[in-house]
Image (cartoon, rainbow, N blue to C red):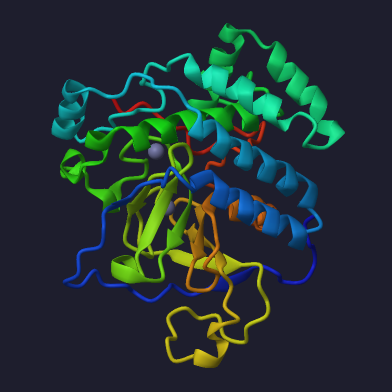
Amino acid sequence: MAKSGESIVRIMPAEEIVARGGGQAERLLWPQRASFFAERAMRLRQLSRKDSATAGYLAVMADVAMAQQECLADFPDVPLPDEKTLDHARQLAIAPLGATSWTRHEAWRDCLRSLVEKLRGKVADTITPVLDKLSNLSDDELEQQADLLLSGVSKGLDVACAPFIGAALQVYWVHMITSCDPLREAEIYAAHDLDNEPTCPCCGSYPTASVTRASGSVAGQRYLSCSLCGTQWNMVRIKCSNCMGTENITYMSLDVAGPDQDESDEDAEPARNTKPATLAETCGDCGVYLKIFHTDRDPFVDPVADDLATVTLDVLLADDGKIRHGTNLMLVFSNPEPVSSPQSTQ
Ligand SMILES: [Zn+2]
Ligand SMILES: [Zn+2]
């Protein structure tokens, strides 16, 4: 998969500084229940047709995402954060739906089993043993696997089953967020300092990647996208989301098409359309990187899907000694221990 030899990875200077200005960008963008996983499925399908190296995996994940959308539509009523929990979160500026602290309802396991059944006969035969294993795991075993996955612990984690368990947990969290109107009120998050927040204000998980927005009141703004609940939080650009450093940020990409990929050069109009939509924002201070996807260069990017479709960039960055910061529940590495372990924020 990795291209070796020539200098595919291109080190880029820092992006243009995007001042916040007088306009107020929305601080948080919430997942849209009606289309959240369906749009991801469409993107995965589209990417699977482009990328021969990971086409098979992307196609399976497209089916998973479509099944997630169906499971979300059928998700039963479950306990949601009450007024006391929300008030506690607001006062302490902590996540109200903490990935490792929220008491999970068993409905997420029913969701997983339903998801597995929806996938039978749809995905390649090679996936069938994994689906069979998932069907045979006991409730306790599923809860243990969920605990490991949500706390970022790879030891003991079944990496083949993890993407499906992660998929069901995503549905559960998106269901809770989209079902609980008070949870999404701006006031709950008023005390959060999002520019210095490495984890999701709503569930405390690490981001998969960040996305820049191209239109409306959020044009030019960068949002970090939560790996579990899909919530996006606004963080200034040119900043390491791991150590919060701003001095030694560079950008790398796989793209070699454009003659001028200097993001600070706004006059380079002829090269604009050739600029890569996917970059790795790397930090010289702590050595980690997080991918950033630009929707003005590709309006259909999805953090999870595009992250999966650009693993070649991860391979090259690993060869370069860089440490991945993004968490993608659809692709779990068995080792080394992830640099970003989701933590309880309660
Ligand atoms: Zn979250
Ligand atoms: Zn850093």
Residue at the image point whose x is 21% and y is 42% from the top: 185
Nearer to the camera, 248 or 239: 239
Query: Where is residue 163 drawn, in percent x and y?
Result: 63, 33
Q: Position of residue 194 (x, y in %)?
A: 27, 50
Query: Residue 222 location in percent, x, y?
Result: 38, 62
Location of residue 280 by image quarter: bottom right
Q: Is residue 284 left or right of residue 64?
A: left
Residue toward you, 236 or 240: 236
Query: Is 305 located above or below residue 340 in the figure?
Result: below
Left or right, 54 with respect to 200, comes to: right
Q: Is residue 91 left or right of residue 320?
A: left
In what quadrant of the picture does the N terminus appear? bottom right
Q: Nearer the viewer, residue 34 or 158?
A: 34
Q: Is residue 126 visible?
A: yes
Identified at 55% across, 65% down, the residue is 279
- Residue furthest to the front: 74
The quarter holding residue 212 reads bottom left
Q: Residue 119: which quarter of the image?
A: top right
> Which residue is at 22% across, 35% downward?
182
